[in-house]
């Protein structure tokens, strides 16, 4: 190809002229090895944020970012490999439930996850609330555990899509995070680098999600599926509600507790039904059966106890205490707690998930900076949910923290996040749309 010039890429994107695949590959190589200065990369990111990219450019950008580091290849005997990604939310512990269900059904699920930052929780933080458990597994240990148990959840290695790490750091400080093509490339470059055959995307939409509107969430889902297809991967997407928290527990050990309770057989909740749908879709992609058959297979994996057994085996394989699956009191407990009660009769008409998530950070369940230390026992357990009728003095939720001062601070935010109205609100479906082949 002709000699590469970053200024030409900036000019083209600024003038809405598509870049070639070779130009995108050269650009990502230069960003990764540092030969392209940050100020030029930031200029191009702003041009993308303002003018967008074509589908072809987005797929090429995703592939180039994927290939900027290690691309994993799995060779497990007699099975296919599945992966799942959630775009982040409050109370989202689906990975803890989904991975053992899928593994119990004969599909391998080696999962790379991250920590939480801001109002959203992270799967790694949740798992590390289990006494002794580590997510820093070396590759051989990770591979051996997945072969033996069918699933493992490890901290994402820095060797996966290093271009994304550099690009995201710049996007974060240049107000270019809010670009659907850039979000797609960031997410899918890492997902595709993990080498799964089948990917399910849980795209959150609502007040507590990055995507506030269905149209934007649907466009992100479409682009991510197109990028996966361009790389020869099976990919489905589900748009799920994040106006209200997912499940009753928000906080690390509290969410592990709720996941274990569900794996003990409590599939009737909205969280349980969502995890069943996610598992069934992955099983269907792995050619296990029809949608109806796969729902039954996933439910049976839970009812029989096999999914919970896989979770215990995974915990033990990651050096944690598997007895937490039998005795929830072995999970970390907060030093202080307080019940927040309704101040009026009526119906719960809003539970602003982002504000509830931010209150949990104040309680110690999250971090505002990467250096902050998490209290694994901190968080909130909801006693009432959206749409429930309550009377003055009824418990709304229980707060857990290390100090009374943290409870005082979070109580104000939580009180403002829950709205009680005279009339019963309209039902709010958890699953908005499904994008499947």
Image (cartoon, rainbow, N blue to C red):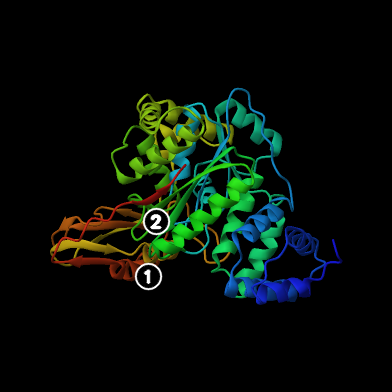
Residue 149, visible in the rendered structure: yes
In the figure, is residue 103 to the left or right of 254? right
At 69% from the left and 50% from the top, the residue drawn is 160
Asked if marks 1 and 2 touch (Cβ < 8 Å), the reply is no
Residue 330 in picture, x, y percent from top left: 43, 39
Q: Circle 1 is placed at which residue position?
A: 409
The extreme front residue here reads 17
| Picture mark count | 2
- Report, in whole angstroms, how far the alpha carbon at label 1 lies from the one at label 2: 13 Å
Q: Circle 2 is placed at which residue position?
A: 379
Classify the position of the N terminus by image quarter.
bottom right
In the figure, is residue 270 to the left or right of 91? left
Residue 204 in picture, x, y percent from top left: 43, 56
- Which callout, 1 or 2, points at the residue further toward the start of the chain? 2
At 54% from the left and 59% from the top, the residue drawn is 373
Q: Which image quadrant is residue 11 in?
A: bottom right
Q: Which image quadrant is residue 388 in?
A: bottom left
Residue 154 in picture, x, y percent from top left: 60, 43
Crowding near the residue tagged with mark 1, few <14, some 14–19, many ≥20 C-alpha atoms within 10 Å: few
Of 308 and 104, nearer the camera is: 104
In the figure, is residue 284 to the left or right of 145? left
């Amino acid at each position: 190809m002709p000699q590469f010039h970053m200024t030409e890429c900036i000019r083209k994107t600024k003038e809405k002229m598509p870049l070639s695949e070779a130009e995108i590959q050269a650009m990502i190589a230069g960003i990764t090895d540092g030969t392209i200065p940050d100020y030029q990369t930031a200029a191009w990111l702003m041009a993308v944020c303002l003018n967008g990219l074509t589908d072809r450019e987005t797929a090429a950008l995703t592939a180039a970012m994927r290939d900027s580091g290690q691309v994993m290849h799995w060779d497990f005997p007699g099975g296919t490999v599945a992966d799942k990604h959630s775009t982040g939310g409050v109370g989202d512990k689906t990975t803890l439930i989904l991975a053992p269900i899928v593994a119990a059904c004969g599909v391998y699920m080696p999962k790379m996850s991250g920590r939480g930052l801001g109002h959203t929780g992270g799967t790694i933080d949740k798992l590390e609330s289990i006494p002794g458990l580590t997510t820093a597994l070396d590759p051989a240990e990770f591979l051996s555990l997945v072969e033996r148990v069918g699933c493992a959840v490890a901290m994402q290695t820095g060797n996966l899509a290093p271009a994304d790490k550099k690009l995201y750091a710049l996007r974060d400080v240049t107000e270019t995070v809010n670009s659907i093509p850039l979000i797609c490339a960031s997410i899918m470059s890492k997902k595709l680098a993990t080498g799964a055959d089948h990917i399910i995307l849980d795209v959150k939409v609502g007040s507590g999600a990055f995507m506030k509107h269905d149209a934007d969430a649907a466009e992100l889902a479409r682009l991510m599926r197109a990028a996966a297809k361009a790389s020869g991967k099976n990919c489905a997407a589900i748009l799920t509600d994040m106006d209200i928290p997912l499940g009753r527990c928000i906080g690390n050990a509290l969410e592990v507790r709720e996941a274990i309770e569900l794996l003990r057989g409590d599939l009737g909740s909205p969280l349980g039904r969502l995890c069943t749908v996610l598992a069934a879709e992955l099983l269907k992609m792995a050619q296990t059966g029809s949608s109806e058959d796969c729902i039954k297979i996933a439910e049976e994996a839970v009812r029989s106890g096999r999914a919970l057994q896989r979770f215990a085996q995974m915990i033990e394989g990651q050096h944690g205490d598997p007895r937490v699956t039998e005795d929830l009191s072995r999970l970390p407990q907060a030093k202080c707690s307080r019940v927040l009660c309704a101040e009026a009769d009526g119906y719960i008409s809003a539970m602003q998930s982002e504000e509830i998530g931010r209150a949990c950070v104040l309680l110690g369940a999250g971090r505002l900076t990467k250096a902050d230390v998490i209290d694994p026992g901190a968080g909130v357990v909801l006693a009432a949910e959206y749409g429930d009728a309550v009377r003055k003095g009824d418990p709304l939720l229980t707060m857990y923290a290390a100090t009374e001062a943290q409870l005082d601070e979070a109580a104000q935010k939580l009180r403002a996040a829950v709205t009680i109205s005279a009339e019963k609100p309209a039902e709010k479906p958890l699953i908005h749309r499904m994008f499947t082949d």
